[in-house]
Image (cartoon, grey):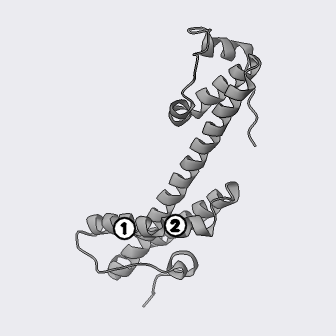
Amino acid sequence: MVALRLSTTHWRLAFESNPEPLPTMNWQTLSTDSPYKTAVAIQHELQEGRVAEAASGLAELIDALSKSEKRALKSQLVRLMLHIIKWHGQPERRSLSWIASIEDARDEIGDIRDETPSLNEQVIKDLWAKAFVMAKRNAEAEMGKRLSAEGLTWQEVFDTVYVLDRD
């Protein structure tokens, strides 16, 4: 839960250019553009006693933040898959930095899931196919070759321990 407290100075600065609120706020656009400005506008609506309008803004803000977290999850999943695809596709180039990237992406996904429990295993499975396509495309671009990989398993992505072979 996030608590917002704005000083009187911040409040005045936020609204002095237009002290009268717009008749109908476009909460969806505002929440997408700036969560901070949305929170300030919600506070203003509450201070003016417009609880229903503030509730609409809060609902849009929650939705926008949820989408942002889901995008972050997908981004980390793509990064994780990318390095695993490269691990399989270029065994001669395996490095400690690839291992670190794999572990870091796993940690980031874990942190996102801890902070946003609704982003559960099912959400990851729903993102899986699209994330794989993006990761494969990026891996092919980085490696400069087409790959035959058709997918990755949950185990490869989240459970396999990647180590360098020391001959």
Q: Which circle, 1 or 2, is nearer the viewer?
A: 2
Q: At x 65% / y 60%, what residue is drawn? A: 113
Circles 1 and 2 in contact, beta carbons < 8 Å: no
Which quadrant: the C terminus?
bottom left
The amino acid beneath tag 2 is Asp
Local crowd at mark 2 within 10 Å, few (<14), some, or many (≥20)? few
Tell me the quarter of the picture where residue 122 sits.
bottom right
Residue 151 coordinates in the image, percent (x, y): 40, 78
Residue under pointer 1? 133
**Place of residue 152 in the rendered image (x, y in percent of width and height, measured from the top left):** 44, 78
Task: Classify 97 as above or below 7.
Answer: below
Q: Residue 12 vs residue 132: left or right?
A: right
- The tag earlier along the polypeptide, 1 or 2, is 2
In the image, is 145 to the left or to the right of 154?
Answer: left
Quarter of the rendering occupied by the N terminus: top right
Q: Which residue in the structure is indicated by mark 2?
A: 126
Q: Residue at x 46, y 82 (%)?
A: 164
Foreground pick, 23 / 98? 23
Indicate whether 145 appears above or below 73.
below
Furthest-bottom residue in this view: 167
Tell me: 3 left or right of 63: right
Crowd tier of the residue under label 1, counting other residues whose Cα lies within 10 Å: few below 14, some 14–19, many 20 or above: some
What mark, if any, has residue 120 been given in the picture?
none
Quarter of the image for residue 139 reads bottom left
